Image (tube, rainbow, N blue to C red):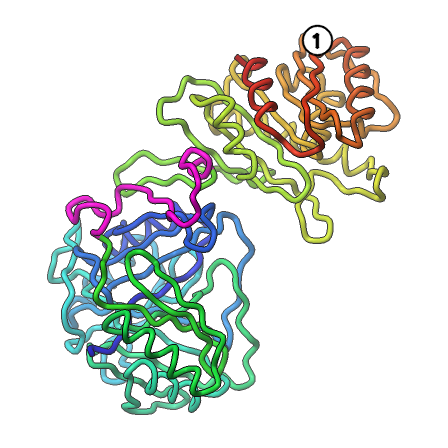
Amino acid sequence: MTSGLHHITAITRKIQANVDFYCGFLGLRLVKRTGGFEDAAQLHLFYGDAVASPGSLVSFLAWEDGSPGRVGHGAASEIAFAIRPQAIGFWLTRALQSGIGTEGPAMEFGEPVLRLKDPDGIIIKLVGTETVRGGAPWGVRGIEVEDAILALRGATLLSEHPAETAGFLTRHGGFTAAETAGSITRMTSQSGQILDVRDATGFWPAAPGTGAIDHVALRLPDVAAVNGEVKALAAEGIDAVNVHDRKYFYSLYVREPAGGLIELATDDGPGFAVDEPLETLGTTLFIPEHFSLRREGIVPMLPQFGLPGEPRILYRDLPFVHRIHEAEVPDGSTLVLLHGTGGNEASLLTLGRKILPAATLIGLRGRATEEGVARFFRRLGPMQFDQADIRAEAEAFAGFLEQAGHAYGLASGKTAFLGYSNGANLLAAAMELHPGLVHRAVLLRPMAVLEPEPASNLAGADVLIVAGDEDPYLGHSEQLAERLMRAGADVSYKRVATGHALSDEDVAVAREFLR
């Protein structure tokens, strides 16, 4: 058994910035892009060396515009990469030229260490070392092979029970306590990789979120060894173990005594080349088979990005968090999507792609929250709405459209809108408060929420309202249709055989209307 690290997994808030840093700046190879194994609608990227060797891998779950996590005990706080000692000067110069702040170089455990932070604030250490064996550096423009990252050097684990954490790593990961410096005990492995266990007694606990390291994966030789650890852990009274076939490796997850999440993963593959050639690793998006999902139903929900040198979406900081999904062959049209209560900017992207396959989709996230879920305006009771908040959010929506028009080149004559439930309600209110803002809209399960009814001139607006036969708010949809017609809008009113939830019939009706 060659003990050491298999991979380290963290969470990122902006996948494009993450790709630019790990591929563009650090020069790692993108070796796999998949939907998440726990949530297929969550993009999961793996970076590594030229051949995706275990021990070279760092992966990221994309929580686009997600809430930040917190570094604390019960999680890792730093990721260390191994480079040749003579490459420290190159990386210091490269960081300065790239506008990336650094600390050091400084000596730690006899090795030169350069510290910097990735775009999410995760501490990255570049460690000059001769002890890490193996690795196949990935040569990229601007980074010579002799300067390239070799593999993972290690990670720093924050523990309130450092002795127990160290014992766990020894018994189940094959690590050995080597030396101590201050509050840090260095654990070494047969691969030359290390884990630094830092006494974090008195620290606050870690919290999951963007900018946080989710888990550290240790290497085991094969499936039999992983299954053997299940029995060994059970003998210690640890039964909370999740075993998974991750397609590219087999692994189990367990909490070490101080609460840190540890994965034990197989070294013997089958590896990342099992479903795409080594020469083209990381170029195809894979959706885990166990979800049994149709590709077209999940891909629009995953954030898009470009590798260094490829086209990419340049997001602007606008009033609403938003997600753009570009069609493979765009026709110049745009569909703006507003989710219902509890949704987010990605919730309607699959629906939008079914309706307009060639349109650019822009999904918005509501800025109000109710019991932790997103909405587009506050609600005071089941049928009572914060009128000031509706007006403020409608104003913000108008501002968003004006700025997005300049930022993304939206053509008003080729831009349509679709809102569902709460999102449809804000869209209708914005039309009433800002005549001329929206010319073509699909309102799914809407109701009128503005009081009193404003005096609006909606001549030239083309609106489709789709109500559900069994929707308890059916009568409210009818009232909104009458209200918009009184204001001069051309309203088409359709009913579908469902309740408040969306159906395939909604797709067909909306597609026909927008076509």
Write the residue at 16% across / 72% down.
85
Rendered location of residue 187, percent (x, y): 30, 85
Rendered location of residue 232, percent (x, y): 38, 84
Write the residue at 45% across / 39% down.
298
The answer to whether 218 appears left or right of 382 in the picture is left
Write the residue at 68% across / 28% down.
498
Residue 278 belongs to magenta span: yes
Residue 89 belongs to magenta span: no
Is 62 above or below relative to 219?
above
> Which residue is tagged 1?
490
Q: Which residues are magenta?
A: 273-300
Write the residue at 38% across / 76% down.
156
Is any part of residue 126 visible from this angle?
no
Is 251 above or below relative to 451?
below
Q: Amino acid at mark 1?
A: Asp
Q: Nearer the viewer, residue 50 or 144?
A: 50
Callout 1 secondary element: strand
Q: Nearer the viewer, residue 494 or 439?
A: 494
